[in-house]
């Protein structure tokens, strides 16, 4: 029996990359986008959550990322 680790790895990588304030924050406090400011707000958490869901859905369902181990 094999396990499909593709969606898990894609979710972890996207979660790290789309953490608000780590690489970028959309929307930022003073501008539309800021890079590496390490701050966050409620609206940026919502925007980054929607981006995470949209990109993960595209990767897992539309493209079909698979990594079978076992």
Image (cartoon, grey):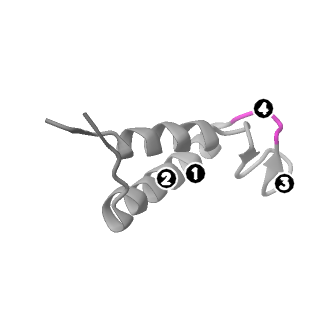
Q: Is residue 69 above or below residue 66?
A: above
> In the image as oriented, which residue stretches furthest toward the left?
1
Find residue 29 and report its horizontal and vertical position in percent. Answer: 80, 44
Label 1 secondary element? helix
Q: Which mark is residue 47?
A: 1
Q: Earlier in the sequence, mark 3 or mark 2?
A: 3
Disc 2 marks which residue? 50
Disc 4 marks which residue? 38
Q: Earlier in the sequence, mark 1 or mark 4?
A: 4
Q: CA distance from mark 1 to mark 3?
A: 15 Å
Residue at the image position 76 percent from the left and 33 percent from the top: 39
Q: CA distance from mark 2 to mark 1?
A: 5 Å
Q: Earlier in the sequence, mark 2 or mark 4?
A: 4
Decide if residue 31 is on the left or right side of residue 60: right
Q: Quadrant of residue 61?
A: bottom left
Q: Earlier in the sequence, mark 3 or mark 4?
A: 3
Observer-nearest of 56 and 7: 7
């Amino acid at each position: 029996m094999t396990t499909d680790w593709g969606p898990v790895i894609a979710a972890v990588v996207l979660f790290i990359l789309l953490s608000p304030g780590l690489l970028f924050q959309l929307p930022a406090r003073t501008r539309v986008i800021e890079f590496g400011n390490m701050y966050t707000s409620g609206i940026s958490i919502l925007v980054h959550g929607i981006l995470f869901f949209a990109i993960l859905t595209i990767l897992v369902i539309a493209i079909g990322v698979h990594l079978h181990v076992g």
